[in-house]
Image: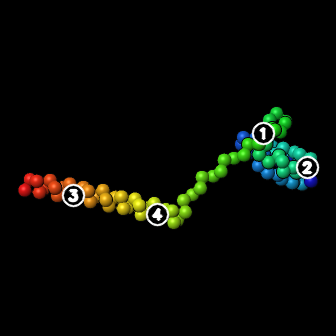
């Protein structure tokens, strides 16, 4: 069995693969044992980095409840703006009248 560390486009280990056949690829680095400590380490010139390159946390998406609340607040603000515009128009009409 051939064990490989899988590299992403930045040469950072993102996982492992055990294959029956040998693979020749820049993204597959043959290793002797599957060592979880290699995860997030960069493979540079045949050497694993000391530093880990942990990807940033994905941005949390808005929950449905949060979106409903945000849209309701926006709707209320839009309604207030429309009422203020109408009030200004009526004031101008009354001043001219």
Placement of 22 over or under 81, stated as above or below: above
Q: Is residue 54 left or right of residue 90?
A: right
Question: What residue does disc 2 label?
Answer: 33
Q: Are marks 3 and 4 in contact (CB under 8 Å)?
A: no
Q: Dot 4: what SS?
A: helix
Asked if the residue under mark 2 is in contact with the one under mark 4, i.e. CB atoms within 8 Å, the reply is no
Q: CA distance from mark 1 to mark 2?
A: 20 Å
Task: Find residue 76 and report its image quarter.
Answer: bottom left
Residue at horizontal 26 percent and vertical 60 percent from the top: 83
Of pointers 3 and 4, the one earlier in the residue sequence:
4
**What secondary structure is found at the residue carrying circle 1?**
strand
Residue shown at 85% from the left, 36% from the top: 46
Return the disc, 4 or 1, that comes first in the chain's sequence.
Answer: 1
Sequence-first tag of 4 and 2: 2
The reply to whether dot 4 and dot 1 touch (C-beta < 8 Å) is no
Mark found first going from the N terminus, 1 or 2: 2
Q: Residue at x 47, y 65 (%)?
A: 68
Instruction: Nearest to the eye among marks 3 and 2: give it.
Output: 3
Percent of width and height locating residue 47: 84, 36
- Residue mark closest to the camera, 3 vs 1: 3
Which residue: 18% across, 55% down? Answer: 89
Cα–Cα span, label 3 and label 1? 63 Å
Q: Position of residue 12 (x, y in %)?
A: 76, 43
Mark 3 to mark 2 CA distance (whole Å) = 76 Å
Q: How is the image coloured?
A: rainbow
Q: Residues within 10 Å of mark 1 (few under 14, many from 20)?
A: few
Could you tell me which secondary element the residue under label 2 belongs to?
A: loop
Label placed on residue 87: 3
Q: Which mark is residue 37?
A: none
In the rendered structure, the answer to whether residue 29 lies left or right of residue 76 reads: right
Residue marked by disc 1: 51
């Amino acid at each position: 069995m051939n064990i490989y560390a899988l590299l992403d486009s930045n040469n950072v280990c993102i996982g492992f693969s055990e294959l029956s056949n040998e693979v020749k690829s820049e993204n597959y680095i043959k290793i002797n044992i599957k060592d979880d400590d290699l995860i997030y380490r960069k493979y540079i010139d045949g050497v694993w980095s000391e530093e880990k390159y942990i990807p940033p946390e994905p941005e949390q998406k808005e929950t449905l409840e949060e979106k409903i609340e945000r849209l309701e607040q926006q709707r209320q603000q839009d309604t207030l703006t429309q009422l203020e515009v109408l009030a200004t128009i009526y004031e101008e009409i009354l001043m001219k009248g």
